C-alpha cells in the first residue's frame, strides 16, 4: 500500500475493536488475565496498550520499518535510545543540532560516561577519521536544526557500519512523508511526534522505528523497563493527526518554499537557509534523499539583534513560540529560545548568529503570511 493509504489504515483492524472505524482510546492501566497464569494479549499499559499498539504499527509502516515505539515525548524517545549505550561509548554528533538533544548529551549522559563528540558530518574524511578512533553510533539530524544543513544519509550510514557503529537519524523535520532514512541504511529513526507527525500543536510525543529485530527487542525492553511510553489519549491524537500527514506536508512544503523564495528577494534579508532553493549548497543532495523540504527553515536578517527583536515583535499571524510542524505558523529566535541552552562558544562554532530567525510555516493563506512578514520587516 502507498503512503496515504497506510497513514489512514496501517495498524488498525476494526475487528479487534468491536468494529470501531477509528481506534478507541483504551484508557486503562491494567488488563484482566484470562485465567490463572493466562495473560491476555495485554497485561499492563506500560508494557503495552491497544491504542499505542495501533500507533506503533502505523509509525513502522510509514517509515518502512519492522517495528515502531511510541514515547511520551521526543526526549523520552531519545533518552530510551541513549540507554542502549554503555559507559565509555562515544557517539558522533553533527555539530549543529536540536538544542534539547545537545542538553541531553551534555547534562544527563556525559556524567554517566556516554560521550557525544561533535563533528561536521558533511565532511566524509573527518567522519572516517572519527569512526576509526572508535564510536558506538553516529547521531544524524538532516536537515539540521536550525541551520538546515543536510547530512548524506547513505554515505554516513555506510561509513558507520564499516566501523561497527549504529546510524541513528532524527527525522522530525521532514516526517516519513518526505524522507525515509531506513531506506538509506540508517538503523534507528527517531521522531518528536509533537511536530509534523501529530501536526496540531496539542500533543507532546516521540517515536523510534527500526528494521533490525535485535534492536526492536532491545528498544521494546527499554521502553517497558524505563517507563518512557506514550499514554493512550496522546496516541489517539497522534493517530488522528497522521491521517492528514500527507496532505499537510504537501501544503507546508508549498507554503514554506513560496515564503523562502519571497524572503530571498527581500532587500532586508541577508540570506535564506532552505534546501529547496538552488542557492542552498546541498540542493542536489536534497533532491537525492528527500521528496520535499517540509515547512521549517531559517533566514538571516540584515541588522543586529535589536532589529531582529523589532521584527519579531511586529508579526501578528506568526506566533512567537518554540516548536514547529503545527498547522499554525510560528517564528522564533534560536539563540534566545530553542538554542539558549547551547553555550555561546559552541553556538558561534555552529554559526548561530543573533540575526538568525527560524520559522515554521503553517497552513494559513500564503498571501496573509507574506503580508504579515512584510509589515514586520518594515521595522528592521
Ligand atoms: C522538538 C524536537 C525534539 C524533542 O522532542 P519533544 O517532543 O519536544 O520532547 C527532538 N528533535 C527535534 C529535531 C525536535 O524538533
Image: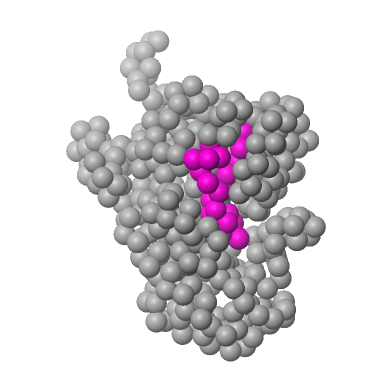
Q: Quadrant of the C terminus?
A: bottom right
41 over 157 or under it: above or below: above
- Inspect the magenta stretch and tell me whether residue 84 lies in it: no
Q: Which one is nearer the viewer's eye here, 145 or 51?
A: 145
Q: Is residue 122 left or right of residue 40?
A: right
Q: Which one is nearer the viewer's eye here, 350 or 46?
A: 350
Q: Is residue 101 left or right of residue 260?
A: right
The x and y percentages for residue 239 are 36, 47
**As drawn, which residue projects farthest toward the top?**
37
Residue at x-position 56% and y-position 71%: 272
Which segment is the magenta one?
137-157
Residue at x-position 41% and y-position 38%: 183
The x and y percentages for residue 135 are 67, 31
Q: Quadrant of residue 353?
A: bottom right
Residue at x-position 58% and y-position 33%: 160
Q: Which one is nearer the viewer's eye here, 166 or 289?
A: 289
- Inspect the magenta stretch and tell me whether residue 140 lies in it: yes
The x and y percentages for residue 331 are 56, 70
The x and y percentages for residue 379 are 62, 88
Res. 47 in view? yes
Q: Which one is nearer the viewer's eye here, 134 or 319?
A: 134
Q: Is residue 373 left or right of residue 362?
A: right
Q: Quadrant of the N terminus?
A: top left
200 over 302 or under it: above or below: above
142 over 351 or under it: above or below: above
Q: Quadrant of residue 163?
A: top right
Res. 26 in view? no
Amino acid at each position: 500500500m502507498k503512503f496515504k493509504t497506510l497513514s489512514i489504515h496501517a495498524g488498525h483492524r476494526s475487528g479487534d475493536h468491536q468494529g470501531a472505524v477509528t481506534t478507541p482510546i483504551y484508557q486503562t492501566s491494567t488488563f484482566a488475565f484470562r485465567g490463572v497464569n493466562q495473560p491476555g494479549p495485554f497485561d499492563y499499559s506500560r508494557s503495552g496498550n491497544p491504542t499505542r499498539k495501533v500507533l506503533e504499527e502505523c509509525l513502522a509502516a510509514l517509515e518502512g520499518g519492522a517495528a515502531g515505539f511510541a514515547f511520551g515525548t521526543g526526549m523520552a524517545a531519545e533518552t530510551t535510545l541513549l540507554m542502549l549505550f554503555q559507559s565509555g561509548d562515544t557517539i558522533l554528533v553533527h555539530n549543529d543540532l536540536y538544542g534539547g538533544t545537545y542538553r541531553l548529551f551534555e547534562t544527563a549522559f556525559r556524567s554517566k560516561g556516554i560521550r557525544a563528540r561533535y563533528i561536521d558530518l558533511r565532511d566524509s574524511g573527518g567522519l572516517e577519521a572519527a569512526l576509526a578512533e572508535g564510536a558506538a553510533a553516529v547521531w544524524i539530524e538532516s536537515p539540521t536544526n536550525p541551520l538546515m544543513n543536510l547530512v548524506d544519509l547513505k554515505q554516513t550510514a555506510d561509513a558507520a557500519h564499516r566501523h561497527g557503529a549504529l546510524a541513528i537519524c532524527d527525522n522530525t523535520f521532514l516526517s516519513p512523508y518526505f524522507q525515509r532514512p531506513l531506506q538509506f541504511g540508517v538503523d534507528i529513526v527517531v521522531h518528536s511526534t509533537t511536530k509534523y507527525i501529530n501536526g496540531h500543536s496539542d500533543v507532546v510525543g516521540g517515536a523510534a522505528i527500526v528494521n533490525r529485530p535485535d534492536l526492536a527487542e532491545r528498544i521494546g525492553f527499554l521502553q517497558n523497563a524505563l517507563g518512557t511510553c506514550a499514554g493512550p489519549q496522546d496516541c489517539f491524537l497522534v493517530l488522528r493527526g497522521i491521517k492528514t500527514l500527507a496532505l499537510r506536508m504537501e501544503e507546508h512544503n508549498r507554503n514554506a518554499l513560496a515564503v523562502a523564495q519571497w524572503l530571498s528577494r527581500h532587500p532586508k534579508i541577508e540570506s535564506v537557509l532552505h534546501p529547496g532553493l538552488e542557492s542552498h549548497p546541498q540542493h542536489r543532495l536534497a533532491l537525492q534523499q528527500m521528496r520535499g523540504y517540509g515547512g521549517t527553515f531559517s533566514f538571516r536578517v540584515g541588522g543586529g539583534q535589536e532589529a531582529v527583536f523589532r521584527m519579531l515583535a511586529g508579526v501578528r499571524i506568526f506566533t512567537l513560540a518554540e516548536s514547529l510542524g503545527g498547522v499554525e505558523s510560528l517564528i522564533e529566535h534560536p539563540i534566545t529560545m530553542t538554542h539558549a541552552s547551547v553555550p555561546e562558544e559552541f553556538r558561534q562554532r555552529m554559526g548561530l548568529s543573533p540575526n538568525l530567525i527560524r520559522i515554521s510555516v503553517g497552513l494559513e493563506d500564503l498571501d496573509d503570511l507574506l503580508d504579515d512578514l512584510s509589515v514586520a520587516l518594515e521595522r528592521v
